[in-house]
Structures are given as structure tokens and as C-alpha cells.
Amino acid sequence: MSELNKIALKILSNRKGILAADESNGTMTKRLESINVKSSPENRLKFREILFSSEEGMKNIGGVILYDETIRQTASSGKKIPELINSFGSVPGIKVDTGAKRMVLDPTNALRMVETITEGLDDLRERLEEYYELGARFTKWRAVININKSCPSELTINANAHALARYASLVQEAKMVPIIEPEVLMNGDHNINKCYEVTSRVLQECYRELKFHNVDLKGTILKPNMILPGDKSSNKSEAQEIAKMTLKCLKENVPSEVPGIAFLSGGQSEIEATQNLNEINKINDTNFIISFSYGRALQQGALKSWGKDQKDILNTQKIFSQRSKMNGLASTGQWLKELETE
Ligand code: 13P
């Protein structure tokens, strides 16, 4: 077994998933302002440290994705943040893309930034070396694909898949596991079939490019969206249908060498994200470990509780631990709605 494959399995085995705490300072500012907390490096660390030091909560967290600011910070105990994460047997990771920018010559709507290309390849080799020194053993790069009447274009799908493959090969050269995240957004009035069709095209192109760039798929983790109707679609789908279509899409488009798939939550509510993951695992007849890499769906409730009383660290941790435990159960199809009322 290769070292990279071992890391990928360590992150996702035994009912574990990933805590995506890599919000950029801009996004984190919005989150903190929503609970009337000033966004400063100290306050961003305070909230994140509450999560990272929760012994219960970390039981189901095999990896934590950090932002550049956080991987350099020191917890109140004096431990460096990557050290704190390691102390729970969890693996520190780092977001390395520099964000989705407007796609060149985007014919759809230059002002609304419908088509985007994710950037961050400049100096990536050198940045990876530094992140490895700081303790990171896996990385994340998120491509963003929008659905509307005229997009995504082939150009946008191809340019993003190409960038993901260049990123992944550099990350493996630096001895870390790349998370491949091509997110098809749920914004829009499209139906579930459209999401299925676009996600299939995107995954096919990603794996074509990854293979072309000689990426060892056994040393990668896929972070996809679930197959969902658009958030403004008039047709809602039951969890069973979402699970069936999501698993079908993965089986048809993800090579069997990929050891693990960890979904993003992408704007689903906390319970929806857990329930859908559970339904997928109930019918998972593949060898893929299918788990979670949630940002909002692991943190929303905890953030709200912290906003109400910043001194009540235990309650904030309790709420985070509940989400982490519920998603751990969902990663083997053993979650039950009744457990949510505990
Ligand atoms: P959400 O689960 O909030 O979509 O965030 C996951 C993530 O890391 C997006 O890149």
C-alpha cells in the first residue's frame, strides 16, 4: 500500500470524515458577522479551536482542512494547530487554491461571474513544501461549476479539470493527498436530472485529465456534490432518490482505484446532509468509502450557539460533537432520525 493511500484511508476509515474549516477570511467574516462577532485573527482562531479541541467531536473527524492563517496559529494550550489536530489522531490538511475567478471571455454574463476558473497554480510547488513543513498531509482545491441555461461550457469544464489535475500531480509530488473537489453548485431552478448530467460530464473530464497527468488515483480523495435538484427547482426529491442517483453517478464516472469519496454539503441543512449521506451508504454496493467533508453542515449549529454565549464552550462543543457523531453513523448507513432528538 502506498503512503498516500494509507493517509487517505486514515482520514476516512472507521466512521470518520473531514471537517472543512478552511473558510477564507472573507467567508469567515460573513459567518462571524452573522452572529455579531468581530472577525479578527483571534476570534477566528477562538471559534475554530473550540471545535478542534473537542475530544468527543474529533472522534469522527479523520482530517481537518485548514486555511493559510489557521495552520500558522497556536492554540491557547500552546500547541500549534496542526499538533492539536494530530493529538486526536486526525490529519491536518490545507486549502491551496486561491479562489474561483471569472472565466476568460465568459459569454454568459461577465458581471455575475457565472463561469469561473479556480486559480492558485502559481508558486504552488513552493507553497506545498512549506505546508508540508507546517504539518499538512493532505490538501484541497475546489473547482466551481454553475448550471444555467447556457452553462457550463465545455471550456469551463475542461479548464477546471486541467487545473485540478495539475494541482493533484504537484501535491502528490510533495507527498500529500490531494482532495479533488469539482463542485457543481445547487443554485438554480434545474431539476435533478440536469445535476446528474452535468456532474457526470464534470467527473468524466476530471478523471480523463487526472489520468493524463499520471496522478495515482489510490492516493486521492474525491469531494463531490450530491445529485440534487436546484435550490429553486419546483420539483423536490426524497432522500432515497437523491441517494440512488448520486450512487449511480459515482459508479459510472469514478474509477474504482479511488479509495474514498467525501461529500461537500453545499448549502444543504445539517440534517439533510446527514440523512442523504446515510441513504447513500444504505445502498452503497461499491468498494468506495463514502463519507463527509462538510463545512457548513458540521459548523452551523455550533456557530449559532457560540454566538449566543461565547463563554459556553461546552455547549458549542456538544452541538458540534452531535453533528460529527451523526455524520459518523451516516457514513456507514446507521444513522436514525430518532437519534437527533437526544
Ligand atoms: P460546505 O460543506 O459548506 O459546502 O463546505 C465544504 C467545502 O469545503 C467547500 O469547499
Image (cartoon, rainbow, N blue to C red):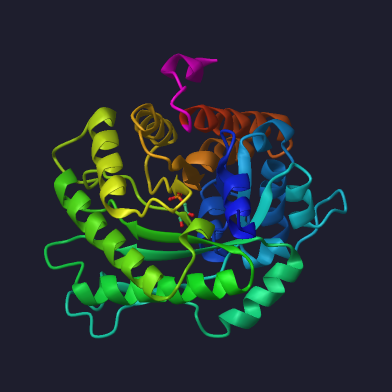
Looking at the picture, tell me which residue is in the foreground, 26 or 246.
246
Please state, as top left, top right, bottom left or bottom right, where the C terminus lies in the image: top right
Q: Position of residue 303 (x, y in %)?
A: 57, 41
As displayed, is residue 25 above or below residue 297? below
Taking 178 as reference, is 227 left or right? Answer: left
Picture coordinates of residue 125, whole percent (x, y)? 60, 81
Q: Nearer the viewer, residue 27 or 326?
A: 326
Q: Check if residue 214 falls in the magenta segment.
A: no
Image point (35%, 72%), residue name: 209
Residue at the image point whose x is 23% and y is 85% from the top: 105
Question: Does any portion of residue 112 appear in the rendered image?
Answer: no
Residue 51 visible, this orientation: yes
Instruction: Classify residue 79 as left or right of residue 52.
Output: right
Relative vertical location of residue 108 with respect to residue 123 in this rendering, above or below: above
- The reply, left or right, for residue 116 in relation to residue 305 is left
Quarter-of-image position of residue 321: top right
Q: Position of residue 126 (x, y in %)?
A: 64, 82
Q: Is residue 332 magenta?
A: yes
**Left/right of residue 148 with respect to residue 181 in the rendered view:** left
Residue numbers of the magenta segment: 331-342
Viewer-side residue, 186 vs 292: 292
Residue that sits furthest to the right in the current view: 78
Q: Position of residue 150 (x, y in %)?
A: 13, 68
Please determine whether, in this image, residue 281 is positioned above or below residue 30.
above
